[in-house]
Amino acid sequence: MQAAALKKRADDAPFDRDPEQSFTIPSRYYLDADILAQEKEAIFYRNWYYAGHQSQLTEPGCYLTVQVCDQNIIVIRDKSGELKAYYNVCQHRGHELLFGSGKVRTITCPYHAWSYGFDGELKAARNTEKLVDFDKCQFSLKPVQVEVFCGLVFVNLDLDAAPLKQQAASLEQEIREFCPRVDEVTFAQRDDYDVASNWKVMIDNFLECYHCAPAHKDFVSLVDMDSYNIKVHEIYSSHISNAAKTTENNAYHFEKGEVDFGYAGWFLWPNLTIWIYPGEPNISVLQMIPNGAGRTIEYQDWYLPNPEPSQQQRDAMDYQRDVLQPEDVGLCESVHRGLQSKGYNQGRFVVDPERSELSEHGVHHFQQLYVDAMDCDI
């Protein structure tokens, strides 16, 4: 049964599949805690979720853990070199098995020492030798899908979900075009942000550059805004611009790299953005994680050919952390406060036929994916 918050109300304007005709989704979708609970089931438990990078899992026994909302997941490399993923919970009494990241010989519960192999099978359970009808095979770890995509590790709680490479077939080729050395990068740095905003506000903001000229004056000096182009695909969108006519800009200094461009970014449904800045090879991911209806935790992980960044790479990372991201955080927190106003319910997508750099069709694409996933009646 559809929750009342998802049903059309008398003052709701229509959300239309044609972005040039459509209003935005109503403000309650950003504010209602009951809607967030439904987002977990309808979106986050059914789609590919960024967990880390293959450089963190170089040998058998290397593992990392990731929270998919309230579901704790282990990703571990097995003895044959394959990646496996499981719910991070002991099948005895529910204690968490592993924490953070590291390397283990076996997966051993710190509570009662039940131990599991990298294949998820229960290997040892103390004092169960005389337990009537005890069958170790009934207590294997519950599996989760795992996939490596351009070196990034993703998990999916839906065992029937199609592979990410199938759902986003052309994305890998696009990423490799702008970062040819993507297979050589390794983890360099994580920056985190605690934002007083709904997670969808953060993604809406990423998906348009209508706000770039008034709000990101350093960024627009980095790129050729006339060439800034947003293209939507099945479950992702690309945000690409040519290089500015000079490398001199107000963001950071760089020399032209292997690929001459101004900026390359992608949104990957449901909550990941991928960034490549011009200059020396780099790729980063910025994940928007809901922390209640009104807060978002953001993680930006940087991957470089060497874990110690060059001066140019450091300048790019510092610009993102200290300038561009704080600008966006301030914008999104203001929007979230505004969404709570009794004087606002919906806006209108600003979409032009040319799909120019000012067009908001990328935001509409995300909201269409959201409306379909949540089965909203608007």
Image (tube, rainbow, N blue to C red):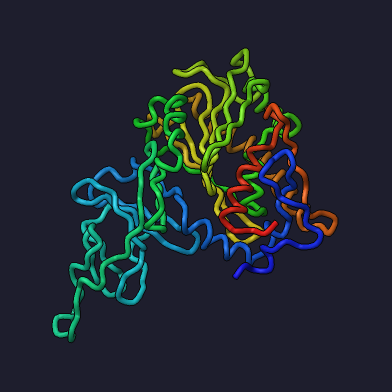
Is 4 rendered above or below residue 127? above
Drawn side of residue 83 relative to residue 165, left or right: left
User: Residue 163: image x %, image y %?
Assistant: 38, 46
Picture quadrant of residue 177: top left
Q: Measuring 40% from the left and 48% from the top, which residue is drawn there?
A: 154
Picture quadrant of residue 330: top right
User: Residue 178: image x %, image y %?
Assistant: 47, 25
Quadrant placement of the N terminus: bottom right
User: Residue 120: image x %, image y %?
Assistant: 25, 62
Single out the residue that lies furthest toward the left: 129
Drawn side of residue 167 relative to residue 318, left or right: left
Quadrant placement of the C terminus: bottom right
Q: Measuring 57% from the left and 20% from the top, which residue is drawn there?
A: 253
User: Residue 205: image x %, image y %?
Assistant: 66, 42
Is 333 rendered above or below residue 263? below
Is 336 rendered above or below residue 362? below
Drawn side of residue 229 relative to residue 269, left or right: right
How many numbered circles are shown? 0
Single out the residue that lies furthest toward the top: 245
Q: Measuring 47% from the left and 56% from the top, which residue is drawn there?
A: 46
Say which of 240 and 64 sits in front.
240
Single out the residue that lies furthest toward the right: 343
Q: Measuring 50% from the left and 56% from the top, which residue is drawn there?
A: 44
